[in-house]
Image (cartoon, coloured by chain):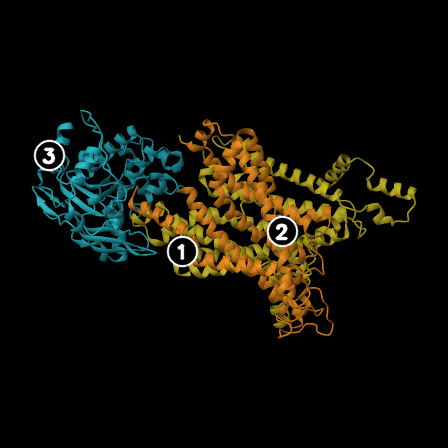
Chain colours: A cyan, B orange, C yellow
Amino acid sequence: MTSLLEIRDLAIDIKTATGWRPLVHSLSLSLNRSGALGLVGESGSGKSVSTRAVMRLAPEHSRVNGTVVYDGEDVNTMNRGRLREYRSRQVAMIHQDPRSHINPLRTVGDFLTEGVRHLPRGERRELAVSALADVGIPDGRRRMDQYPHQLSGGLLQRVMIAAAVMTGPKLLLADEPTTALDVTTQSEVMAVLGEAREQHELALLFITHDLELAAAVTDRLAVMYAGTIMEEGPTAAVSRAPQHPYTIGLLASQPNVRGARRERLTPIPGRPTAAHESGPGCPFAGRCLFAEDHCRTERPAPRLLGESLVRCHRAEDPEIRQAAARIQEES
Amino acid sequence: MSLISVTGVRHVRGAASSLRRDPVVAAASGVLAVLVLLALLAPVIAPYPPGRIDLYAIDQLPSSAHLFGTDSLGRDIFSRTLYGARLSLLGPALVTLAASALGGATALVAAWYGGRLEQALLRALDILMAFPGLLYAVLAVVAFGTGLLAPAIALSIAYAPYIARVVHAVAASERRLPYIESLQLLGFPPSRTIGVHLLRNLRTTIVAQTTINFGYALLDLAALSFIGLGVQPPTAEWGLMVGDSSSALLNGSPQESIAAGGAIVLTVVAVNLLGERLAARAGRSSRS
Amino acid sequence: MVATAPHFLTAPRFRGGRKAAQLAGRWVGFPLLTLFIASVVLFVAVAMQPGDPVTQILGSRATKAAYRVEQHKLGLDRPLIVQYWHWIHGAVHGSFGDSLVYKQSVSSLIWPRLTVTLGLVAYAGVLIVLFGVGLGVAGGVRRRFGPVVAVLSGIGVAVPGFLAAQVLIAVFAVRLGWFPVLGSGSGIADRINHLTLPSVALAIASVAYVAQISRTAVADAAGRPHAETARGRGLPGHLVTRRHVLRNASIPIATVSGLAVASLFAGAVVVEQAFGLGGVGSLLVQSVADKDSNTVLAVGLILVAVFIVTTTLLDLLRYLLDPRMRKGARR
């Protein structure tokens, strides 16, 4: 089965006063039709820019290398008309902060109907109202005439999901869709998102810093650090038997939402480094508890270990395996 | 949080620390420093007294004897431009310093005490801001007569709200930050907290807005002299000089217009550039 | 942003419910209060002026009796507050007394001159909207023009009206002879011709300022997340620009343009003087120099009133442009 989305060797650099600065290094991912892939990482790891690259929305003053293939077609070589068509009908994106991503000066109805300009004018509103009903907004007709500032954050995020789904896309990109919301709203929005996916058989690229949350909604996970994917594999493998010290660290530092409480939260020492700050070796070496000399000088290549691709020189080391096992016991 | 914003913040920090290395800032401050120096050293540099009339040498084009030529009374334009810099720069300097002191103090009091006092002060500032500075200056001339002082005082009051508004915006948000509260709990008197901590954090904002006001004050004061309501002839002042040069210009002697007008434009451009960069920096630092 | 910030940006601090009474306060009450305070300040300033109008009329050799009679005739023997009441009462009814210099009613002096000033300001206002907003939008939308617009406007804001006036007269009126030098002309075409150079001189700095602000406003709106959303949804470029960039930039643009137009009334004082135009601005300067109290008071009050009306209309426009000011809180 061919994959719906195939990212190969994606590299994004941004121009600064001092020269080109890498944001993302040779990133490769693939996502199956109606599959769900979680892209997990701390802020600054490059997950958002990578996702935007899927839509060919590069940040200003940046250059993008590598290919993004959607349904057998290279996104970066699409002509203008095809790109518009692709953006409006094939993919849709949900953003972290709906309040800043929806124009505050236009009504909810304007926002929704704008996405289905290919339909006759009369049908757009009907479709929008039913899309609102699908995401749990029953009084769609009234909402259509309201402005974003009159809606709560959770409601606005539902509007964003409705807008994303109503164009009939095959791929949904969700960039931290619940981070800006409060906890109860978060689970509601996740539920709405799940329903929408099921109903429309959407493939999902889910970007989050929350590994547990990603594990709950995806079938594959990619863990990103400093613009590089450190570990990628089936969700169960990555979240239950992590092999990369960074993944282990992420799991250890997150409170457990399902079941028993972990005795203590172990933060990863140091602050997250950005892609341009990493030296010649493993980007994580500076914060890794298991780093050895060659980790700092030699960049590890991704290796297939079990079902996962792991970018670590020492992944099979018993010391690391033990650490992973300890996390499992605690959770 | 995405990578974009993280790197964005780093950019900004880099830009802030490199303000001194910014070529635009360097050029603008260089121009201003030279102008101030020329104004201070006018008696030393100027080849003629600014008021010396020579009716045998009127409207002369630039020559070795008269670097910028002479005006319609045969006065040396170069010397007058140098001396003119003194009043033309001193006036706006007085205005902006007074405006910043007045506006800054009002804003800090409003932000610090809050409540009705804050509302009343802000409303008063709104009313003050309802009119252009030039009208205040004309009014001051009506009440106190022409010269530099009356318009300068009027403009100081007119410009105070602009400082007050930006300072209040920053101070009001700063006021709510935990560090202010902890200083209060530690028993520091308000004067000290405002004076030392708050003011230090507001310094860039105040300097930026003061710089921006300087350009406007210079233009307003020059305009006032031009229409005859500011400093009076035969004083050397740029606005007056532009006014004086009208007939010479029509007779094909543009030297005085160019010298005085050029001095005004050059100063204001330099001040504005500097103010813009400072304001951008203030905006960033208050956000990050 | 820069120095000029309109009072109404901060003025009435109404949050929550928008009742008719509050709006009336905002567009009627606050302007009237401002006008009242301005009139008091104006009156006090004129009353404080050195010199004595009675002596001015009769000369210093008048007898005490004649002085008293004249003083009583002018109402100057009454307390200041009564004088103020008398003046403002007359002003509201369109009567400003007689000019001490021209020996005719101030109203008959003002009305013909007011049309000149209004014509000048209207003409300059058109130039501001056309060129200021035009250049700014062009520089913001077409990034290539951005630096050009930035440099031109950076110099333009530093050119005072009186200097521009002088240069325009020397070049276009005297050297090239394209436009008349002085006066305000008769007949519509001739008047427009006479007003062209003054309007350009008056508008130049404001055009530059408005261009500067418009350019940043457009660039800022184009970089906002909601514009990215619109692009990401495959909306054609011209629609993104119109609905999500220009629409949003229109609020700051309208604000500065309106304020710039209002400030023209102050600039007109200078430019009319430079061009020898018989408008209210030059009348103000002349009457200040002549210590013609009644005329100063009348012109001052009219300028202030016109200014307040302009800024109030502008606030109304902002209210119409920005739904966030218009509609209530979340429902």
Q: Residue C265 carries which label?
A: 2
Q: Is mark 3 on a helix, strand or loop?
A: helix
Q: Distance between the residues labelled 3 and 1?
A: 58 Å
Kind of residue at disc 3: Gln
* Furthest-left residue in this view: A306
Q: Which mark is residue C141?
A: 1
Q: Quadrant of the C terminus of chain C?
A: top left
Q: Distance between the residues labelled 1 and 2?
A: 31 Å
Q: Quadrant of residue C304?
A: top right
Kind of residue at disc 1: Val
Image-based side of B23 in relation to C8, left or right? left
- Foreground residue among A192 and B8: B8
What crowding class fits label 1: few (fewer than 14 Cα within 10 Å), some (14-19), or many (20 or more)? Answer: some
- Foreground residue among A9 and A170: A9
Q: Is mark 1 on a helix, strand or loop?
A: helix
Chain of the residue that carries numbered disc 3 in the rendered image: A
Q: Which mark is residue A322?
A: 3
**Eyeballing the image, is C4 above or below C159?**
above
Q: What element carries label 2?
A: helix
Instruction: Name which of mark 1 and mark 2 comes first in the sequence.
Output: 1
Residue A4 showing in the rendered view? no
Q: Which residue is drawn at 69% across and 39% down?
A: C40
Dot in front, 2 or 3:
3
Are the numbered discs 3 and 1 placed on the same chain, yes or no? no
What crowding class fits label 3: few (fewer than 14 Cα within 10 Å), some (14-19), or many (20 or more)? Answer: few
- State the image coordinates of residue B117 (x, y, percent, origin top left): 57, 31
Q: How far apart are marks 2 and 3 (CA)?
A: 80 Å
Q: Residue at x 83, y 49 (%)?
A: C56
Kind of residue at disc 2: Phe
Image-based side of B81 in relation to C151, left or right? right
